[in-house]
Image (cartoon, rainbow, N blue to C red):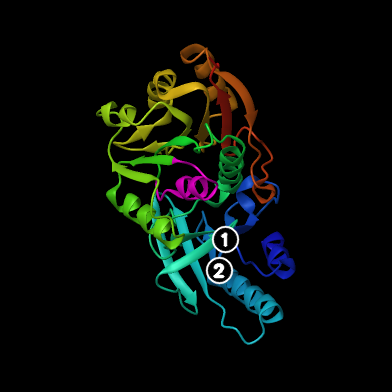
Amino acid sequence: MQALLNAIATMDLPTDAQRIFHGRGGLYPGCEQWALDAFPPVFVLTSFQPASDDELAAVGTALATRWQQLAPGEPLNWVFQCRHEGRTETRLMDGKVPEPHVVTEQGAEFRVHVLKGQNHGLFLDMAEGRRWVRDYVTAHPVGGRGATILNLFAYTCAFSVVALQAGAKQVVNVDMSRGAIAIGQQNHQFNGLSGGASFLAHDIFSSWGKIKRSGPYELVIVDPPSFQRGSFVATKDYARLMHRLHDLLMPGGHVLLCLNAPELGVDFLQDQMRELAPELTFVERVANPAVFADVDEARALKVLVYAAPGL
């Protein structure tokens, strides 16, 4: 785990939420089980294999040493989570976690919850996807009124927050989890966004009527889980979404397709798009944050941009 300890010893003072060390990318042999994230003022160490007391003690010592260099006299707060064989165990190792715990990213504020569940409320690997949406909305004012956006599988609505901050006219957020949608509404409140967003706790596959009613959209964001039993299985359900894109997009509109499944490469999305939505043109793959570099880019998060034909 020396590479992890080296990353801690040389890290800068984190202000925004960010990944510090990404062993999962395979660039540090022997450290594949480890990830370290900063959700200021809390560090979250994740292991995908059981960790020994000695290993945790070594990380704790490294964090304490570096923290005293970066923030002398300030308390160290850190959490350890082990994910192994379908089980998740989370414990507070030192300090405390604020409640509510609100972090920043690129000028936006988001509520997170690092002591429960595997998904903490903000996916750090999607930071460049959110930056792309912000830049897109800024560059595509529709008739001077701002873009209309459909945010499918919205989770806690981070895409919506950055889009509205950039001047979007309307964002329709859809997610079947009422709890996630409720946090998404809080995220808009934290950022002083009182209008422009609608929130629909809805299973998109049960009915498309409510979703189509607010369209067509300048931008459709599709960011589903790769596998969630009873909700979405990428290998069979992504095709059902692609069939709908033509009806959801306005002429000249764009779609952001996201997939975080290591076993499915870029070809999985591109081949299906050629077959199911041939009228849409591939534009680019959005780069992931540098810290999430992977020995095999096909395994890493896929964020692809497609464009609809204009009038």
Residue 28 lies, with reference to residue 37, above or below; the image says above
Q: Earlier in the sequence, mark 2 or mark 1?
A: 1
Q: Position of residue 143 (x, y in %)?
A: 52, 31
In front: 264, or 304? 304
Disc 2/disc 1 C-alpha distance (Å): 6 Å
Is disc 2 in contact with disc 1, using a CB cutoff of under 8 Å? Answer: yes
* Magenta stretch bounds: 155-169
Q: Secondary structure at mark 2?
A: loop
* Residue 51 visible in image: no
Q: Position of residue 252 (x, y in %)?
A: 54, 22
Is 166 inside the magenta-drawn segment? Answer: yes
Q: Position of residue 200 (x, y in %)?
A: 30, 42
Residue 199 lies, with reference to residue 274, above or below; the image says below
Q: Secondary structure at mark 1?
A: loop
Is 184 inside the magenta-drawn segment? Answer: no
> What count of labels does the image hold?
2
Residue 263 lies, with reference to residue 90, above or below; the image says above
Q: Quadrant of the N terminus?
A: bottom right
Q: Which residue is mark 1?
A: 17
Q: Amino acid at mark 1?
A: Ala
User: Which residue does the image show at 43% across and 53% down from the upper left?
Assistant: 119
Q: Residue 297 shows which numbered tag?
A: none
User: Which residue does the image show at 60% across and 83% down from the upper left?
Assistant: 74
Q: Which residue is mark 2?
A: 40
What is the quadrant of residue 241 in the picture? Answer: top left
Q: Amino acid at mark 2?
A: Pro
Q: Position of residue 168 (x, y in %)?
A: 49, 42
The residue most toward the front is 144
For mark 2, does the 10 Å Cα neighbourhood hold few (<14), some (14 to 19), or many (20 or more) residues? many
